[in-house]
Amino acid sequence: MPADTSASSAAPVGCTNFKLRQLTRRVTQHYDQHLAGTGLKITQYSLLTHVDRLGPLAPGELARRMDMSASTLTRNLQPMIAAGWLLVGEGVDARSRTVSITEAGLEMRRQAQRRWKAAQVALNEKLGVATVAALHGLLDQGLAAFHEEDAYVE
């Protein structure tokens, strides 16, 4: 990713990681408050949504597509498997596994989707649609830079 060299840009002040984590905590709280009546956290809703949209897939591929470590995915899967929302079954051979969503998981996702949408709309209103769109663009740009670095290292 090319460095921003425009003269009007101010140098960042403070720790970028700290600022991102502050915002992430607040946004997570916002979504969790909206989802509270379903019994899901936003991280669980996101996991259900990814498995639903991507279909049965290997845990490693799911972790890669969600940009998380395999150990984090495993930790996040456990309560969802226990609740009966996700299933880890046999893969294409004896050494592989696949993650799939169950009927109970689909129903939970449908129930939570209305509340997720309300959270999304409320966040857009709080921050402004243009700000949210700009934030998405910056986040996508930052993720792409890390993905380029990952590809270079491999």
Image: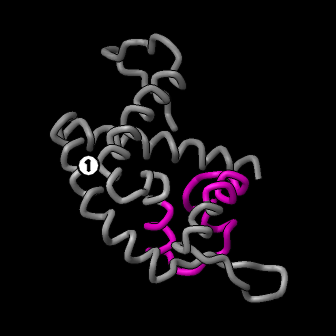
Residue 118 in the figure: left or right of residue 30: left
| Magenta residue span | 47-76
* Residue ID at (61%, 48%): 148
Magenta-drawn stretch contains 100 = no
Q: How many marks?
A: 1
Identity of the residue drawn at 19% across and 39% down:
130
Q: Residue at x 45, y 11 (%)?
A: 13
Assess whether residue 67 is covered by the magenta stretch: yes
The correct choice, above or below, for 32 with respect to 94 in the image is: above
Query: Would residue 2 be found to the left or right of residue 61 on screen?
Result: left
- The colour scheme of the drawn protein is one colour
In percent of width and height, residue 68 lies at 62, 52
Location of residue 86 in the rendering, given as x and y in whole percent from the top left corner? 56, 73
Q: 10 Å neighbourhood of mark 1: few (<14), some, or many (≥20)?
A: some
Residue 82 location in percent, x, y? 61, 68
Q: Nearer the viewer, residue 2 or 153?
A: 153
Quarter assignment of residue 60: bottom right
Q: Main secondary structure of the magenta part?
A: helix
User: In front here: 1 or 72?
Assistant: 72
Of helix, strand and loop, which one carries label 1? helix
Residue at image position (33%, 63%) is 112
Residue 84: image x %, image y %? Answer: 55, 74
Examine the rendered structure and indicate whether residue 1 appears above or below residue 97: above
Amino acid type, mark 1? Ala
Q: On the image, numbered disc 1 is attached to which residue?
A: 119
Q: Nearer the viewer, residue 28 or 84?
A: 84
Residue in the foreground of this view, choosing between 86 and 122: 86
